[in-house]
Amino acid sequence: MLNTVYRLVAPRRFEMAYQNIGLNGEDILVRPTHLSICNADQRYYQGLRDEQVLHEKLPMALIHEAIGDVVWDSSGKYKPGDCVVMIPNTPVEEDDYVAENYLRSSRFRASGYDGFMQEYVKISPDRLVALPPEMDKLVAAFTEIVSVSVHALSRFDRTAHGRRRTVGIWGDGNLGYITAILFKTMFPETGLYIFGMNRDKLSDFTFADGIFTVGHIPKGITIDHAFECVGGAGSGKAINQIIEYIEPEGTIAILGVSEFPVAINTRMILEKGLRLIGSSRSGRKDFEKTVGLYREHPEVLNYLSNIVGAVVPVHGISDMKRAFEMDIQKSFGKTIMMWEK
């Protein structure tokens, strides 16, 4: 069958391409219905990546946060109309020590390979996880970024020592908010402090045990471990402030993405004996754990619904461009494209 792929061919310019999809083998056909725009998508859309990177990766269909309805499954595991979340990471090998999202051979959709901005997506069965039928699809659309936080929290739990009186999260944006919700759900006995720039955004962290603007941290505040969810130009300042306030032998989980190298205080990392963990993307186990949390803790979904921002019905390229332009103007929240055919 003929499929339409909506590819970014140059900054701010989408074009349609057509490809044949064979319906043989074990792959499943999914029609994307709700697509969430990520900062990584915006870096491509606005041309903020290095010129050589853009040259190598474009043209490319964007979006790696998406859900859809099953259209065809020869195995019978899924029925037509079943709602599934699609996993963008596609490993081509297994390793006893390296997770699928860190294997250099893995292919990640919307990062060198076509993402989910397609009329239909042909996908392997192990790259799908069924969603609860009653789940809010606007929240489900950004399950991928939620799974990234779940992955980081799982790595933290395996690495950080057992003294967990207080943990700090630096970052008052989407990633910080999602990570904070999940942390409080998974570690309810630990005091959680949020450190950010914007007092209005910080007021949304009603479940935290303390909120502080980074320029006005009270004397005597210390933390046992920390998460950096700032990224960009501010990540260096955030990491250095964490190093200042963290107790010796604490663990710092770094989630924020920066396009450029940042300078950090390695002297104090050594003096305090700190552990730094980098976490990026996620794998099938993280998606399954995330959907399990949705089922077991419905309050998580209520909190996540607070960051549903603009919802843009999409019929074609002009609507896609409008959604991306609207997303640029937002200060908080996730922009969701709702595919209408």
Image (cartoon, grey):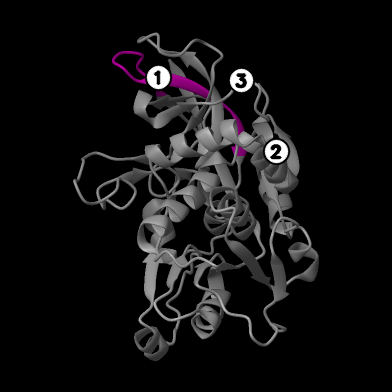
What amino acid does circle 2 point to?
Answer: Asp
Whether residue 43 appears in magenta in the rendering, the answer is no
Please, what is the three-letter code of the amino acid marked with disc 3? Pro
Residue that appears at 45% across and 74% down: 260
Residue 319: assigned label: 2
Q: Vertical placement of 103 versus 209: above or below?
A: above
Q: Which mark is residue 28?
A: 1
Give the percent coordinates (x, y) of residue 52.
Answer: 39, 64
In the rendered view, does 286 fall on the left or right side of 301? left
Tell which tag, 2 or 3, sits nearer the viewer: 3
N-terminal-most mark, 1 or 2 = 1
Q: Secondary structure at mark 2?
A: helix
Q: Residues within 10 Å of mark 3 (few under 14, many from 20)?
A: few
| SS for callout 3 | loop
**Quick one: quadrant of the C terminus?**
top right
Give the residues in magenta.
20-35
Q: Amino acid at mark 1?
A: Ile
Marker count (numbered): 3
Nearer the observer, 273 or 199: 273
Q: Residue 78 versus residue 47: which sits nearer the camera?
A: 78
Residue behind mark 3: 133
Picture quadrant of residue 89: top left
